[in-house]
Amino acid sequence: MFGTSRRPRRPTGDKLFRMLALDVRVDTSVANCVKSVLSQAGRIDLLVNNAGVATVGALEETTIDEFKNVVETNLFGTVRMIQAVLPIMREQHAGRIVNIGSVVAFLPMPYSAAYCASKHAIRGLSESVDHEVRRFGIRVIAIEPGFIRTDIVQRSSVAAPIGEYAAAQAFPVRHFRQQIEQGADPAVVARVVVEAATAAHPESRYLPDSFARLMHTVRGVLPSGCFDWVLRRYFRLD
């Protein structure tokens, strides 16, 4: 098995994972990484796309470059990796591709529009490509967790503020950060990745934690107007 990072630590792995350099934003980095895996393992049976970044702020505050940076990593990085491994998996007539999406693929998250847009796209990408490649013995699966305890908050950029948004976004942004800090253990997602990778008949999408499952149910049950009212009260937007 292999793990990747833009700047792998030394030593380059342990007995379970060998670490390789990879920047999903760069075509040559993707090609070199896939080539390295093939030279060492001889085949690729599973790809897990987990690279992700975010930016915090209202859309009006967010520059095009900031928005592009999120989409470049979260969406186009995933596309690059899928395109790089599909020829290999087609030749094997077998393979699994697991894309880590988010609950925000179906749950609005004010002041995180770029991140939400990228995760909506991951859902559409995963479901569409899954139907394209099933006949080759390949499955593409999306996993959509809720709040997971990671360092994405510390690594998120913050848009330059516009005064009119300051008061309204203070609580949603603070709440989002707190929920991440107190989120579920990443092992919850890892276990579902293993399930998706090994199940004889995997689902197209998985909701790995209780918050994601609850929000999916609530979004499906409540009328749209009622859900909208609850969301705005929850984030104190009125």
Image (cartoon, helix red, strand yellow):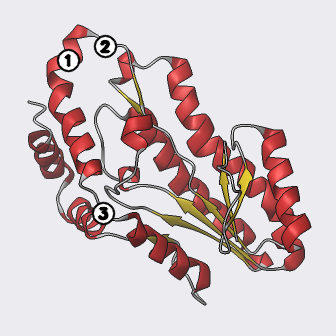
- Image quarter for residue 144? bottom left
Q: Do the residues labelled 3 and 2 touch (CB within 8 Å)?
A: no
- Image quarter for residue 3? bottom right
135 horizontally vs 193: left or right: right
Residue drawn at (61%, 90%), measured in percent from left and top?
200
Locate the C terminus and report the quarter of the image it occupies: top left
Circle 3: element type: loop
Q: In this view, does 56 lie above or below 151?
A: above
Residue drawn at (39%, 37%), measured in percent from left and top?
154
What label does residue 196 carry, if any? Answer: none
The amino acid on which the numbered mark 2 sits, given as a three-letter code, is: Pro
**Residue 40: image x %, image y %?**
87, 68
Report the residue marked by disc 3: 184
The amino acid on which the numbered mark 3 sits, given as a three-letter code, is: Ala
**Residue 27: image x %, image y %?**
80, 40
Report the residue marked by disc 2: 161
